[in-house]
Image: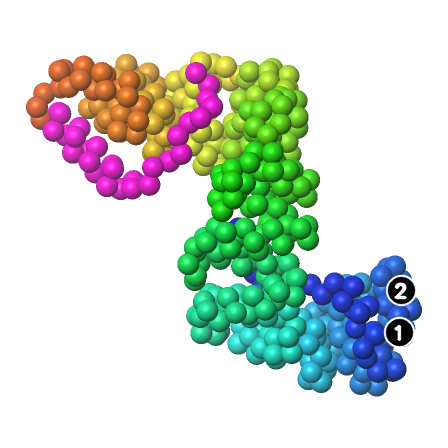
Amino acid sequence: MSCTSRPRCPILLSALIALATSVACSSPTHSSLHAFDRGEYSDALAEWYPLAEAGDADAQYLLGLLYDEGRGVRTNPSEAVKWYTRAAEQGQAPAQNNLGLLYYDGRGVPQSHEQAAMWYERASAQGFAPAQSNLGVMHLFGQAVSKDPERAQELLQRAAEQDHVQAQCLLGAMYYEGVGITRSFSDALHWYRLAADQGAPAAQHRLGVMYFLGQGVSQDDERAIDWLQRAAEQGVAQAQFAVGWMHQEGRGVGPDANVAATWMRKAAEQGMDAAQTNLALMHIEGRGVAQDDAEAVRWLRVAAHSGFALAQYNLGLMYAKGQGVTRSHEDAAMWLQLAAEQGLAVAQSKLGSMYEHGRGVSADDVTAYVWYSLSASNGHESDQARLERLARTLTPAQLAEAKATTRAWKSNHEERAPQLTDAVE
């Protein structure tokens, strides 16, 4: 799912300040809550501790929050559990929710999804949106409660209608992916937009993708890059890559290789293999960055080691050419083999050529035929002529062996890998 499905939702300070207007006179004052807001935790602690000891549920909750988050005191989950429990047993909904979180994660208490669900249920029954969202996720996946997509949707919708951003994002993801409910791009768009308007980066990213693809809305590159940019500025690597690509291609904005490279680098530095590969290609061509084959190889190597087929293919080509590295047909064949095994047609074609001509591997026309055949069936039409040429040189037994190997490979590799859109030629 495009939004996190882990049932965790911190309590915001604005909710704490609002709480002070509806509790008894002995409860925490505005001054102590504002002291908390200013980071003056010792002042807040000094007021809340005696109130908590005297049995004030809101002070107990707030004291638990200090220990839970390590504000003004050393983080102490066990102490947080103690104070949350005292408040939760008095019916304090935020404490019930946060106690559920600690049980869910096993922090300060033995992990128990059953206890987490119980406390979420109690807070949810009071209409507390974060607990409704957390309990909804547990019902969605059947964690310690019945797996019930309808109940999950009901709970998440209740929370979402209270402007709970996590619930809005999760509902958007459920509708977008058809998890537990009928897939609906229009409903996904509705909930994603509400979450995006509240600044949720995952929702902003997904909304940008939907505008780019025209899912549930008319295709619109300008609106797409607007939402993607917002997510990118909040550090979403996929959005940074998308913004970079759109600047590179001039989609929704004027083409600008320098801006494209800036965003590609941000995504690459977060470990996104597609961005690392694209940035490498930009270094090879000197687009928006200095031409630097060694730097290109560095990025390709990082992405290739993560298993990204396009990087493995391009790194193989760099070794074959001796571009940015010492020339090595053996290393070229190794990287091309890894990419070819993932179903990348251009890698399969290149590997077939290496087997046909014995570069980096022992010459083997049967194996060459296999890779050419796989490449041709994946859309690399130029290999059809190579297949016909090899077929004339193989014995009937060799040709039968090659075709059987090809069929076996296909049966073991049902999903076809993404094809190359921008590679070293």
- Can residue 134 be seen here? The reply is no
Q: Where is 134 relative to 202, above or below?
A: below
- Disc 2 marks a residue whose amino acid type is Ala
Tell me where residue 88 sits by quadrant.
bottom right
For residue 292: magenta? no
The front one of 326 and 21 is 21
Q: Nearer the viewer, mark 2 or mark 1?
A: 1
Q: Earlier in the sequence, mark 2 or mark 1?
A: 1
Q: Position of residue 223 (x, y in %)?
A: 60, 38
- Identify the residue under disc 1: 29
Q: Where is 350 relative to 62, above or below?
A: above
SS label for mark 1: loop
* Residue lying farthest to the left in this orientation: 396
Disc 2 crowd rating (10 Å Cα; few below 14, some 14-19, many 20+) is some
- Disc 1 marks a residue whose amino acid type is Thr
Residue placed at 33% from the left, 41% from the top? Answer: 415
Residue placed at 36% from the left, 24% from the top? Answer: 346
Q: Which residues are magenta?
A: 398-425
Q: Which mark is residue 35?
A: 2
Real-space Cα separation, disc 2 to disc 1, in angstroms: 10 Å
Disc 1 crowd rating (10 Å Cα; few below 14, some 14-19, many 20+) is many
